[in-house]
Image (cartoon, helix red, strand yellow):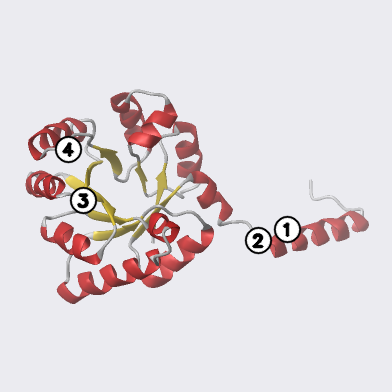
Amino acid sequence: MKFFVDTADVPAIAELNDLGMVDGVTTNPSLILKSGRDILEVTKEICGIVAGPVSAEVVALKADEMIAEGRKLAAIAPNIAVKVPLTWDGLKTCKVLSSEGFMVNVTLCFSANQALLAAKAGATFISPFIGRLDDINLDGMELIAEIRQIYDNYDFKTEILAASIRSVNHVKQAALVGADVMTAPPSVIKALASHPLTDKGLEQFMADWAKTGQKIL
């Protein structure tokens, strides 16, 4: 499974990228706001750090304006994936931009039918929102499984990008059910390395090593 980091925090992206933990980046208007930076400037900087797709989201609501914004965002760098909402205008935009050879990430997906439409419109990525479904007592992971089955049934090439990931368990479950990509905040990616038994074992090793009175360096 590919790891995308869901942030516009450049130092955090660079740190994870240096460890080989970043296959791409996703941003959205909320993350741009949090960064406090100009969208074109920060997106260009991220594209210079990360070799994989960097999702930059349009903010218009009508197809003609979305297409214009998408082309402007795509001009930032060759690895831009234009992010559009799963609305009828967003699907129109997806069809146009994907036909022009641009990567398109269709976001805010909450049903398998929506995902089917996105694939038929030529989406590079579909972004089902796991956490937001869980928030209203629906099973976000069930949606991933449904999309996986539909895409496999018809050999759609659109990649399933598990989004709105809130926990390490979400990452594991998405991997088990067959998501192609997951996007998560840096804190969640770092938390994948944590386990209380690892900490306990390391503490015991260090205590025993101290008793030997030895040094390696």
Asked if residue 158 lies left or right of residue 166, the reply is left
**Quarter holding the N terminus?**
bottom left
Calculate the distance from the C-alpha at mark 1 to the C-alpha at mark 2: 7 Å
Query: Judging from the image, what secondary structure is the residue with disc 1 in?
Result: helix
Amino acid type, callout 3: Leu
Mark closer to the chain start, 3 or 4: 4
What amino acid type is highlighted by mark number 1? Asp
Where is residue 31 shown, x and y percent of the image?
A: 39, 36
Residue closer to the observer: 203 or 81: 81
Residue 7: give x, y in percent of width and height.
42, 39
Q: Are marks 3 and 1 in contact (CB under 8 Å)?
A: no
Asked if 129 appears above or below 186 in the picture, the reply is below
Mark 3 / mark 2, whichever is N-terminal: 3
Which percent across, then down, holds residue 88?
12, 50
Q: In whole angstroms, how far apart are the C-alphas of marks 1 and 4?
A: 49 Å
User: Pointer 3: what residue?
Assistant: 86
Q: Is label 3 or label 2 in front?
A: 3
Q: Please provide percent x and percent y for residue 19.
A: 50, 46
16 or 98, which lies in front?
98
Mark 3 Cα shell of 10 Å, populated few (<14), some (14-19), many (≥20): many
Secondary structure beneath label 4: loop
Residue at numbered disc 1 = 199
Residue picked out by circle 2: 195
Residue under circle 4?
61
Q: Earlier in the sequence, mark 4 or mark 2?
A: 4
Say which element carries label 2: loop
Q: CA distance from mark 3 to mark 1?
A: 43 Å
